[in-house]
Amino acid sequence: MALALRIVMLLALSAAAQADQFTRFGDLDVHYIALNSTSVPAAVAAEYDLERGETVALINIAGRRRGAEEGVTDPVPLTVEGTVQNLLGQTLTLRFREVKEPGAIYYLATTRFTDRETLRFQLTVTDQERGQSHALSFQKALWAQ
């Protein structure tokens, strides 16, 4: 099942890259995506103990360090902390969990939402290799599926 999760996460990161859903901090690119957890196949969600439901969002954060060779990046271990806020101002703390795969490290969290809700994410991402912390914020409109 490790291959299945890697495929799902690579698809999510591909979507993020195509939509420019990353923030650059020097040579560190932090990719981020929030999507409906039903996008993850049920078997993969069960294997990795991911909450899955039509009103459950999956947040995926990954750090990649750009090397000297163009287009070559390496995974970077991060510490990810933060909150999610809805438009009513209700705030919840996100609990990220690390998933390591060959050639990749992902930080995953879930949160609930109501149909057609826009969520605002306020994160602190710390590069464990260099000890540098960076603020990352984004918002995402989510629909029940």
Image: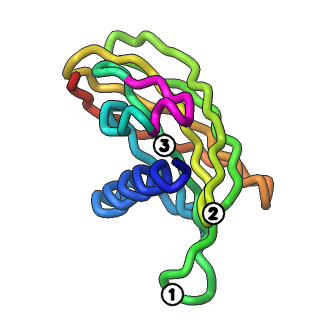
Local secondary structure at mark 3 = strand
Q: Quadrant of residue 145?
A: top left
Mark 1 residue type: Glu
Report the side of 38 relative to 70 (left or right): left
Query: In the rendered structure, which disc, 3 or 1, sits on the residue that comes first in sequence?
Result: 3
Mark 2 residue type: Pro
Residue occupying the point 59% across, 30% down: 82
Tell me if label 3 and label 1 are in contact, CB under 8 Å.
no
**Which residue was labeled with disc 1?**
70
Residue occupying the point 31% across, 38% down: 39
| Residue 36 pos. (x, y %) | 32, 32
Query: In the rendered structure, which disc, 1 or 2, sits on the residue that comes first in sequence?
Result: 1
Viewer-proximal residue, 83 or 39?
A: 39
| Residue 11 pos. (x, y %) | 36, 56
Asked if residue 45 lies in the magenta stretch, the reply is: yes
Part of the protein shown in magenta: 44-52
Report the side of 109 relative to 38 (left or right): right
Residue occupying the point 65% across, 52% down: 100
**Which residue was labeled with disc 2?**
102
Crowding at mark 3 (Cα within 10 Å: few <14, some 14-19, many 20+): many
**Which of pointers 3 and 1 indicates the residue nearer the eye?**
3
- Disc 3/disc 2 C-alpha distance (Å): 17 Å
**Which residue was labeled with disc 3?**
60
Local secondary structure at mark 2 = loop
Asked if residue 20 lies in the magenta stretch, the reply is: no
Report the side of 119 relative to 123 (left or right): left
